[in-house]
Image: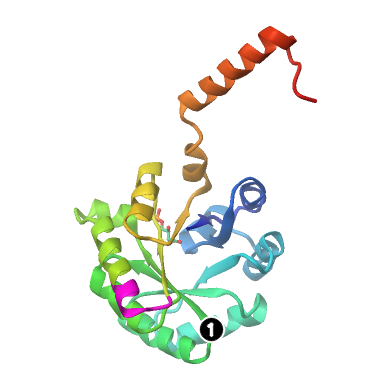
């Protein structure tokens, strides 16, 4: 099970990596817009410094033609490093670029996945991660979890070395359902992952426990 965060905010990344079992960072151009770093590649290198080599960094391309996508991927490897997972939208041209990048032995994350057949194409093209857009698929009236369950079965039955990286989350329940539908990884905004702990019953339980303790040993007296 992998928790990945969908942000390029450096403070947010530092804090989340410090607190939670985060194994990677993803973004897309709209997420980058929120922070609008002047030096994009410098910013990506900063993220790499924070997360280290042991976590995955997924960077999305802008180009839409296969040859241009591959060119941008090479620029990413040159400017950041060649361990980056190149996020390639799963279009007709994108799948061609995935095949080229995989033939070069590079890491590929297939993104913008709305449909099972799109996911199967990315799988057959050798993508390392496939990112179905949970909330956006749901907004179209389709079931993202059914897609994940089918994809998960196909990965297992055919023995592919590929993980489902469920993306596009607005709430905790969607994240839970994505894992339960067979996704090995999720990428979510930090706010969604923090919301896991915002259940008032949790803070009430902690407060009640501590009040019982303080009533015996004195106010603000801990174990140390
Ligand atoms: C992954 O990085 C996706 O681009 C992202 O999760 C999409 O999220 P959104 O649907 O909230 O824009």
Q: Which quarter of the figure has residue 168?
A: bottom left
Along the horizontal axis of the image, is 184 left or right of 204? left
Q: Position of residue 41 (x, y in %)?
A: 64, 70
- Location of the C terminus by quadrant is top right
Residues in magenta? 154-161
Which residue sits furthest left? 141
Dominant secondary structure of the residues highlighted in magenta in the image: helix
State ligand 1's quadrant: bottom left
Number of marks drawn: 1
The residue beneath circle 1 is 106
Q: Position of residue 188 (x, y in %)?
A: 46, 52
Element assignment for label 1: loop
Q: Which quarter of the figure has residue 42?
A: bottom right
Residue nearer the viewer, 66 or 119: 119
Residue nearer the viewer, 153 or 185: 153
Residue nearer the viewer, 17 or 70: 17
Along the horizontal axis of the image, is 210 left or right of 73? right
Whether 155 is among the magenta residues is: yes
Along the horizontal axis of the image, is 16 left or right of 180? right
Residue nearer the viewer, 137 or 71: 137
Which residue sits furthest right? 224
Q: Residue at x 46, y 29 (%)?
A: 199
Along the horizontal axis of the image, is 35 left or right of 218? left
Q: Residue at x 48, y 38 (%)?
A: 195
Q: Position of residue 154 (x, y in %)?
A: 29, 73
User: In the rendered view, would you say 48 is above or below 207?
Assistant: below
């Amino acid at each position: 099970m992998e928790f990945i965060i969908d942000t390029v905010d450096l403070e947010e990344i530092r804090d989340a990596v410090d607190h939670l079992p985060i194994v990677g960072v993803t973004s897309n151009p709209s997420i980058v817009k929120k922070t609008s770093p002047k030096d994009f590649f410098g910013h990506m290198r900063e993220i790499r410094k924070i997360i280290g080599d042991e976590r995955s960094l997924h960077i999305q391309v802008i180009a839409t033609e296969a040859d241009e996508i591959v060119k941008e991927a090479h620029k990413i490897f040159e400017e950041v490093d060649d361990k980056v997972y190149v996020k390639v939208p799963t279009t007709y041209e994108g799948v061609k670029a995935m095949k080229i990048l995989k033939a070069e032995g590079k890491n590929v994350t297939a993104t913008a996945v709305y449909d099972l057949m799109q996911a199967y194409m990315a799988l057959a093209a050798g993508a390392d991660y496939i990112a179905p857009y949970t909330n956006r698929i749901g907004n179209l009236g389709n079931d993202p979890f059914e897609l994940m369950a089918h994809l998960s079965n196909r990965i297992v039955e055919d023995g592919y070395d590929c993980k489902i990286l469920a993306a596009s989350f607005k709430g905790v329940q969607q994240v839970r359902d994505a894992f339960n539908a067979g996704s090995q990884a999720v990428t979510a905004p930090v706010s969604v992952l923090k919301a896991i702990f915002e259940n008032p019953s949790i803070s009430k339980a902690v407060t009640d426990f501590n009040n019982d303790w303080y009533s015996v040993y004195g106010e603000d007296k801990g174990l140390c």
